[in-house]
Image (cartoon, rainbow, N blue to C red):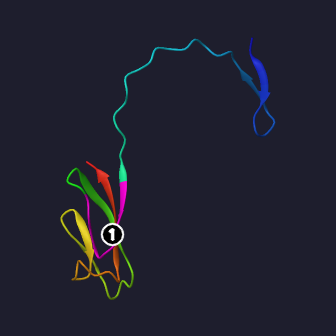
Amino acid sequence: MPRASADLRGRPVLKAPRGEKGEKGDPGPAGTALRVVSSPNASAGCNSDEVMISALCIGSFTSYPLIPAENGARCGENPNATEVKARIVCARK
């Protein structure tokens, strides 16, 4: 027999008894996995099984422009500079 309860506005809601548990289904496809790479210097890259989806430079943008690469990025011309840091987001392919 259904039981009465109330929603957030106090309106009555009928709840039926829970049915029998069904059989376990097959697992679904893997979700998108994101990884943030915070480099200690001006250059950062994704792994070969990932693609870069976002990049930014932590530091002065006017002095260190973001330069995208094939699967990564760098801030300014010197990839080993430590006064600015690259941060990227990688997604699994």
Give the residue furthest to the right. 10
* Camera-nearest residue between 71 and 6: 71
Name the element at disc 1: loop
Q: Is residue 90 above or below residue 23?
A: below
Residue topped by disc 1 = 39
* Camera-nearest residue between 41 and 45: 41
Q: Is residue 8 above or below residue 41?
A: above
Q: Is residue 91 above or below residue 18?
A: below
Q: Residue at x 37, y 27 (%)?
A: 27
* Camera-nearest residue between 12 and 26: 26
Characterize the local packing of mark 1: few (<14), some (14-19) or many (20 or more) Cα atoms within 10 angstroms: some
Query: What x and y, as percent, mark residue 81?
Result: 28, 82
Q: Specify whether residue 20 is painted magenta.
A: no
Q: How many marks?
A: 1
Q: Specify whether residue 39 is painted magenta.
A: yes
Q: What amino acid is found at the position of numbered circle 1 in the picture?
A: Ser
**Magenta highlight range:** 35-46
Q: Residue at x 20, y 53 (%)?
A: 48
Quarter residue 74 falls in: bottom left
Residue 28 appears left or right of 50: right
Q: Residue at x 31, y 75 (%)?
A: 41
Quarter residue 73 falls in: bottom left
Q: Residue at x 60, y 13 (%)?
A: 19
Residue 17 appears left or right of 92: right
Quadrant of the rendering where the N terminus is positioned: top right
Give the residue furthest to the bottom. 63
Query: What x and y, as percent, mark residue 80?
Result: 24, 78
Residue 19 appears left or right of 56: right
Query: What x and y, as percent, mark residue 2?
Result: 74, 15
Query: What x and y, as percent, mark residue 88?
Result: 33, 65
